Image (cartoon, rainbow, N blue to C red):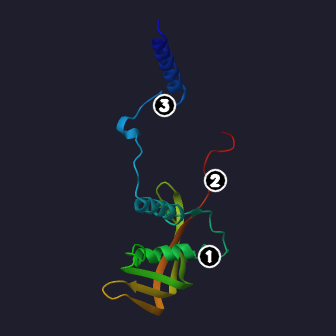
Amino acid sequence: MSTKSLKTVACGVLLFATLGSSGCMHYGPTFGVLGVPLPVSPYFQDAKEDEFWEHERYDRVPILGPITSGGPANALDPPSDDEVIRALERSHPVEGGIPFLHEVQRNNVVIRKELIADYVDPPRFYPMIGPAQLHHAHYKCTVYFTEVKRVGWPVPHTLTDEDAREVIYIDHNHLHMVGNVDMGSSPGQ
């Protein structure tokens, strides 16, 4: 065997050994075209993260223990500043302006929260929950801020509203169990 063919065979064996140990060979299931990662726009990723954040924090109704007899039936905590600003963004969006053409900012934000109503409904049966009372808490949230609008076309100018305000109404509802809460398995089972 000539040295040229011997070198070729040695290079082939070395190449095969290198490919086998480098991770380039794929073992296991393949997903074909679905195995290729696709880029996701930051806009859609941000929207999904906001949707998850609101579902996790604000879209669920908590189920609390029963209201004790003779005790106060006060509402839970007032809405957080994050919840108020997110509700304001849903009703009057600022995000998504066009840079250097039209931008809106809210500066010097002050939030005032007032409890409007706090009452408890009579007990009733809720499917998948059982007998419970619905506790309502209605809040009026006034947001004071300085609104700055920057317009860049046709003539660049800035509009500043020092005394801007918006009113947002937020309802906090939660359930209180009624009756024997420990209706699960008995201690003997």
At mark 3, the secondary structure is loop
- Residue at image coords 45%, 12%: 5
Residue 88 seen anywhere in this rendered image of the structure: yes
- The secondary element bearing badge 2 is classed as loop
**Between discs 2 and 1, the one toward the N terminus:** 1
The local crowd at label 3, few if under 14, some if 14 to 19, many if 20 or more residues have their Cα within 10 Å, is few
Give the camera-side residue of 184 and 111: 111
Query: Is residue 16 rendered to the left or right of residue 178?
Result: left
Q: Determine whether label 1 and label 3 are within 8 Å by CB.
A: no
Image coordinates of residue 110 in percent, x first then y, are: 56, 85
- Tag in front: 2 or 1: 1
Q: Relative to the observer, which residue lies in front, 125 or 93?
A: 93
**Viewed as shown, does residue 168 lie left or right of 156?**
right
Return the residue at label 3: 24
Considering every residue shown, the one lying at the far right of the view is: 187
Q: Amino acid at mark 2?
A: Asp
Return the x and y of residue 178 as percentages of the image width and height: 58, 62
Whichever of labels 1 and 3 marks the residue nearer the N terminus, that label is 3
Q: Residue furthest left?
A: 154
Q: Nearer the viewer, mark 1 or mark 3?
A: 3
Q: Amino acid at mark 3?
A: Cys
- In this rendering, the answer to whether 4 lies above or below 122 is above
Q: Residues within 10 Å of mark 2 (few under 14, many from 20)?
A: few
> Label 2, on which residue?
182
Find residue 74 and name its label.
1
